[in-house]
Image: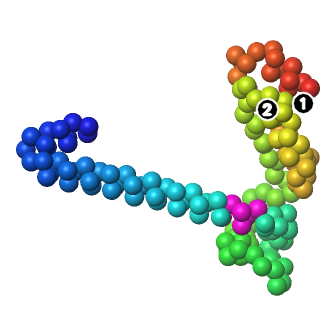
Amino acid sequence: MLAVPFILSFIDVRIAALFMFIYVLINFSRGSASAIRSMQGFRTLRQHQKLPWLTMLEELAAGEVTLRAKRPRWHHYAVAGTKERPILMKPSKVVHAVIIATYKESRDVLQPTIEALLASDYNMKQVICILAYEGRAGRRLNSRRQTL
């Protein structure tokens, strides 16, 4: 791919310049699209963080949405779908595994992460916290795991 402009320059310089212009334009548009999708994803993340997830789980288990509750359209579809095909497992029975991957993170990084997990309003009896690290991290990280 890098040799194409060089080879085209022997044939016609204008074709080589056009090829380079199109190449830069394509990569610019790909970068712009990636940035736009990142901003859209961040906006969606912020909107979903504001949702009352525990209430929505209760509505899903009950099979009906609370009257006058402002919920996303996809939640209404999910709740309506439970009438046709019942949910396989009630949300109250689901156990979540939170995996915290670490290698050389200090206690100053790991402790706030675990504290934020514990401070969430989710039932901690339904959460398994897994601290994942490589064996080459050694005894130092193993002892840090014990203290956390």
Determine if the magenta segment contains residue 47: yes
User: What residue do we see at 54% from left, 60% from top?
Assistant: 37
User: What residue do we see at 90% from left, 30% from top?
Assistant: 148
Answer yes or no: is residue 61 visible: no
Amino acid carrying label 2: it is Leu
Residues 29 and 101: in front is 29
User: What residue do we see at 86% from left, 36% from top?
Assistant: 111
Q: Which residue is mark 2?
A: 131
- Going by the picture, which residue comes out furthest to the bottom? 68
Determine if the magenta segment contains residue 88: no
CA gap between label 1 and label 2 equals 10 Å
- Decide: is 134 above or below 30: above
Amino acid carrying label 1: it is Leu
- Where residue 127 appears, as percent x and y from the top left, is 85, 45
User: Quick one: SS at disc 1?
Assistant: loop
Horizontal placement of 28 versus 11: left or right?
right
Answer yes or no: is residue 2 visible: yes
Q: Which residues are magenta?
A: 44-49
Residues 120 and 28: in front is 28
Type of secondary structure dominating the magenta stretch: helix
- Decide: is 113 above or below 88: above
- Decide: is 136 above or below 107: above
Mark 2 and mark 1 in contact (Cβ < 8 Å)?
yes
Q: Which residue is mark 1?
A: 148
